Image (spheres, grey):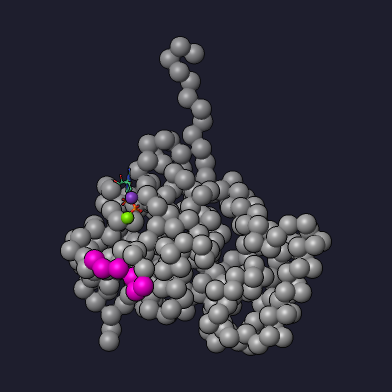
Amino acid sequence: DKTVHIALIGNPNCGKTTLFNELTGSNGYVGNWPGVTVEKLEAPLRRDPSVVLTDLPGVYSLSPYSPEEVVSRDYLLGGEPACVVDVVDATNLERNLYLATQVRECGVPCVVALNMCDLVEKQGDSIDVDALSERLGCPVVGISALRRTNLDALVEAAVEAGRAGAASPAPAFLTGEAADAVDECSSIVAPHVADKARLPWYAVKAFEGDGAALEPLGLPAASVAALDAVRSGVEARLDDDAESLVTCERYDWIEATVADCVVKAPPHLTASE
Ligand code: GDP
Ligand code: K
Ligand code: MG
């Protein structure tokens, strides 16, 4: 069928439900994701019923530690969504971009909805949307779900990305020894990853030793042993565990990106000054 599925992902309180209701008219089907008591909300777009929007649970990352995270990552990697719209709270860019770095590695065509732009403007700050888009390697559309600003442009970008099919390559979020180790892990898992667009995701998961994420690959024991060797070597040398090395690298990237893309308002002079 010609239905295009678009997934909405984002941190809790980034405005996902506000956006979902605005785009669908809120007459969504509400049920649970299979096997867990996590709410699943799905509905066609008001302006194009051949496009179905799925509101994923709010998550801060795609780690395997909560049912919400597992639901979100399984849905993204499962092949149904033609595009993922990552809703980012623009007033909280550092924290929200952490999820964005992981979403970009999944190999699903992605559009970032930079939400709450009305608040950014009110604070007198500004965000260089083009620069952010260049850094993330995917379209970024500044919106206000609450004020209904720029929502048509967002839908257009998402449908276009979904119909185009192929995801643009994920940026290199990691540097140094962690990046080298992830490259090694990538070579080890590559023969077992059918969809090469997913390789950045599986390579990082392989370095982190995320067994649940790797399960669908059915890696032979020799590959698992080779991954363990790469991981334990780096962990011993850098005296830190792989997962936290990756987290640090993501935040370094985010810090540089925010420095490059956000212009803060000059501090106000109060009346008494
Ligand atoms: P969710 O947890 O991601 O589903 O977030 P909600 O849609 O429930 O929104 C969280 C809060 O942010 C609510 O109070 C919304 O009214 C508010 N909100 C959502 N989008 C915007 C926006 O673009 N601008 C402003 N100012 N507030 C927003
Ligand atoms: K909420
Ligand atoms: Mg919600």
Q: Quadrant of the N terminus?
A: bottom left
183 lies left or right of 5: right
Instruction: Please say if 241 is above or below 120.
Output: below
Quadrant housing residue 159? bottom left
Where in the figure is residue 24, as x and y percent of width and height? Answer: 22, 63
Q: In the image, residue 105 lies at what x, y percent? A: 54, 69
Say which residue appears at 42% left-offset and 80% top-offset.
79
- Viewer can see residue 162: no
Up/down of 186 relative to 148, above or below: below
Q: Residue 211 magenta-drawn?
A: no
Q: Which residues are magenta?
A: 30-35
Quadrant of the displayed image that contains ligand 3: bottom left
Residue 97 location, x and y as percent? 51, 55
Q: Residue at x 47, y 25 (%)?
A: 268
Say above or below: 61 vs 262: below
Q: Is residue 171 found left or right of 111 in the rendered image?
A: right
Q: Which residue is found at the position 28% from the left and 80% from the top?
A: 3
